[in-house]
Amino acid sequence: MKTHGLSPPRLTDDKTVALVSQLRGNVGDLRAVLHANLREPLVRFCWGYLGQMEEAEDAFQEVCVRVLESETVPEHFRPWVYKIARNHCLNLIRQRAAHGDGNILPSDSRLHKQLTGQLTRLVRDEMAARVADVFEQLDDIYREVLRLRYVEDLPRTEISAVLEIPESVVKSRLFEGLKMLRERATQLEKD
């Protein structure tokens, strides 16, 4: 996406607060920067919770609105945005549960089935399908940290901020989740 013939700048932690503050006066430019830098990862992130592309797109738009309406921009922008997205998605899931639409997080294997392009080709590979099945069997607390770390590429400190848990708990859940994945994948190979 381009604005005024120039590519929007890439967001980095060092420059994000200054950039967002500077662009806050011109909401159109800020919206372009958010879309260029965050649309793909946040839609994917929301899709992992909601399981429907339309809802994920809507959730991303809502996150953008909340960022634009915020009075202040925290120093650690990326985990703040992911936290907004996570909270919004969890609220939508709670609303579904209140209306009898179910309350579990969608499995990532459903997410993989709907993706196209290179990722689809990888998922079609037998091993990827096995890993997806094993991943689906993990508890939500492990799937969430593993997805934030290995799909969204967030460091442990940012995962800690997004989930509002100590970094030591993030580290432990990553370790235990990977251990369970290995054990279950090994068991599948034996079967």
Image: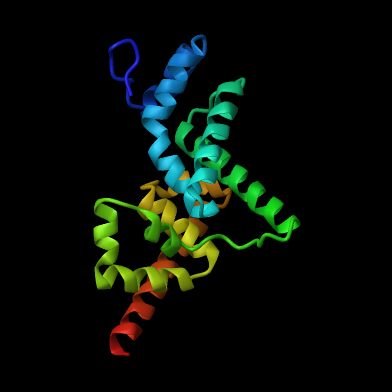
Horizontal relation, residue 23 to residue 59: left or right: left
Q: Residue 20 appears at what percent x and percent y?
A: 47, 19
Above or below for 186 versus 80: below
Above or below for 174 versus 182: above
Residue at 54% of width from left, 64% of height from top? Answer: 140
Residue 71: image quadrant is top right
What residue occupies the far right of the structure in this picture?
98
The answer to whether residue 111 of the structure is visible from this angle is yes
Horizontal relation, residue 96 to residue 9: left or right: right
Foreground residue, 7 or 182?
Answer: 7
Residue at 53% of width from left, 36% of height from top? Answer: 80
Q: Residue 47 appears at what percent x and percent y?
A: 48, 50
The answer to whether residue 18 of the structure is visible from this angle is no
Quadrant where the image shows the C terminus: bottom left
Quadrant where the image shows the N terminus: top left
Foreground residue, 28 or 169?
Answer: 28
Foreground residue, 75 or 42?
Answer: 42
Q: Residue 168 appears at what percent x and percent y?
A: 49, 57
Residue at 45% of width from left, 42% of height from top? Answer: 43
